[in-house]
Amino acid sequence: MRNQWVKREAFKERSMNNYIATFYSHFGALSLCKELQQREGAANTAELIPVPRELSTSCGVCVSFQGDDWVCAKDVAIDLEGIYRVAGGRYEELFTA
Amino acid sequence: MPVADDKKQIKEEDIAKKESTLKEEGTSKAKTFHLLLLPIVGVVVVAVALLLQHLGNPANMGFCIACFLRDTAGAVGLHSAAVVQYVRPEIIGIILGVFIFALVRGEFKPKGGSAPVTRFVLGFAMMMGALIFLGCPLRMLLRIAAGDLNAIVGLFGLVAGIFIGALFLKRGFSLKRNYDQGKAEGSLLPVIALILLGIVLFAPVILLVSAEGPGSMHAPLLIALAAGLIVGALGFITRLCFTGGIRDAILMKKFPPMLWAFIAILVVGLIGNLVLGTFNLGFADQPITHTDGLWNFLGMTLVGLSATLLAGCPFRQLVLAGSGNSDSVMAVAGMVVGAAFMHNFNMASSPAGIGENAIYGFVIVAAIVVGIAVYNTFFRSK
């Protein structure tokens, strides 16, 4: 049982992606973070962090989250500026407003 | 059942562990970078400030964006307060330092178009608060590090203002998005700074210079210019903001890395002042301040609220302005005009206390700022 679970988690780990969503307003970031935290699956993975320097030079916060469905996050977000996939310390642009 | 419960618990724990490692991977690099860089930048900023002060800048005013913009406004004749007129090369240095650095790093991406007039008015309000308190948030930290307890009252006011601003941010405040602008739009302020530097170097007689008072006290031109270049570039790299750190602490409910820079400034500033013999604990007899606690508090509250709505303190606005953000140029313009109004209409504080008309100006401007906050929170089209 446990071995199977570990295997499944390892697979999930490979398929799970880290995303960063940036916003034009703090309210947008706060709202998406709250929304994602309320949903099951993405529970506890969404958090507010300072925007990584590579993405923007403005003084702001962004939402870091995991999952396999960033489009869903895009659809519920307001004031969204962009969504990026984080891979190996690099940011792959998925969407910009 | 207990066995199943145990398993479930193990599973949950493992998931949590995996998730936290995943989370770490994405942000650890940025985190280490900031954790190390921010305190170092704090140390550099305070060292530069103490050096400038030692070389001639006014006491506890090694670096103060509000005061320096005010002095510069006076030097070009925007106000006639004879004791505070001098083109501060630090301001020119910050703008050019950021501009050059952004160009070199390929990060010069001009943006603008997000509520320019609102930002002008908020910049005006920010300057009003700063000139009632007598210092921007950076000078507030330098004053605290020198033992000025009035500045601690100001710190409480600043936190109160940021807290009020954060309440609006949480409920939906936004000045709407910005848009990409042309390179020419972003280069204009650095060009203006360069022209001003040319006048300072080659035709200084056309500028006004104080014969006495804070405006007459200044470090040598080239050193001040170099200090501005360095601090500007560092501010651009780290996005140093003296209100953003406190705002993030309130919004994220955790200790943001930015606060390490504040702590570094306070600790190193304290040590530096003790070594240089400029530490003087107390409320009375502090250089270029007043002891009116209520107005020290309210002045900084206005700064905190305006800066939170603008998403950056005076220093951050100047750095962003140099990096091609035309919205921040509007905020800086608002600050320059605000400084002129404060002195022209006798609203700026002096060591004798607050200005004669400060109360009227404050009530009007604070009402406008609250109006801006309320409108853009509750009535903006989403």
Image (cartoon, rainbow, N blue to C red):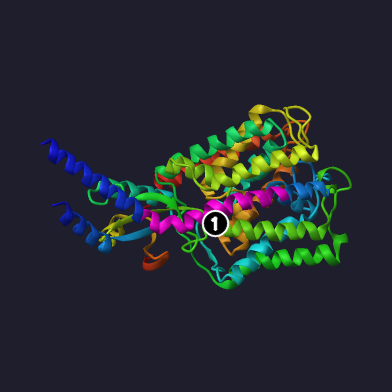
| Residue projecting furthest to the left | B1
Horizontal arrangement in the rendering, residue A62 relative to residue B18 (left or right): right
Look at mark 1 in the image and give the residue it sits on. B116
Q: Nearer the viewer, residue B342 or B319?
A: B319
Q: Amino acid at mark 1?
A: Pro
Counting other residues with Cα less than 10 Å from the Cα at mark 1, is it few (<14), some (14-19), or many (20 or more)? some
| Residue projecting furthest to the front | A3
Q: Nearer the viewer, residue A1 or B372?
A: A1
Q: Nearer the viewer, residue A87 or B81?
A: A87
Q: Nearer the viewer, residue B24 or B364?
A: B24
- Residue, x 40% and y 46% (percent of image)? B172
- Residue, x 62% and y 52% (percent of image)? B40
Q: In this orientation, does residue B130 appear? A: no
Horizontal arrangement in the rendering, residue B20 relative to residue B239 (left or right): left
**SS at badge 1:** helix
- Residue B34 on the magenta segment: yes
Measured as percent of width and height from the top left, residue B215 is found at 82, 47
Measured as percent of width and height from the top left, residue B50 is found at 75, 46
- Residue B292 on the magenta segment: no
Measured as percent of width and height from the top left, residue B96 is found at 68, 64
- Residue, x 61% and y 37% (percent of image)? B300
- Vertical placement of residue B245 versus B180, above or below: above
Magenta part of the chain? B23-47
Q: Label the magenta part by its dominant secondary structure.
A: helix
- Chain letter of mark 1 equals B
Give the quadrant of the C terminus of chain A.
Answer: bottom left
Q: In this orientation, does residue B42 appear? A: yes
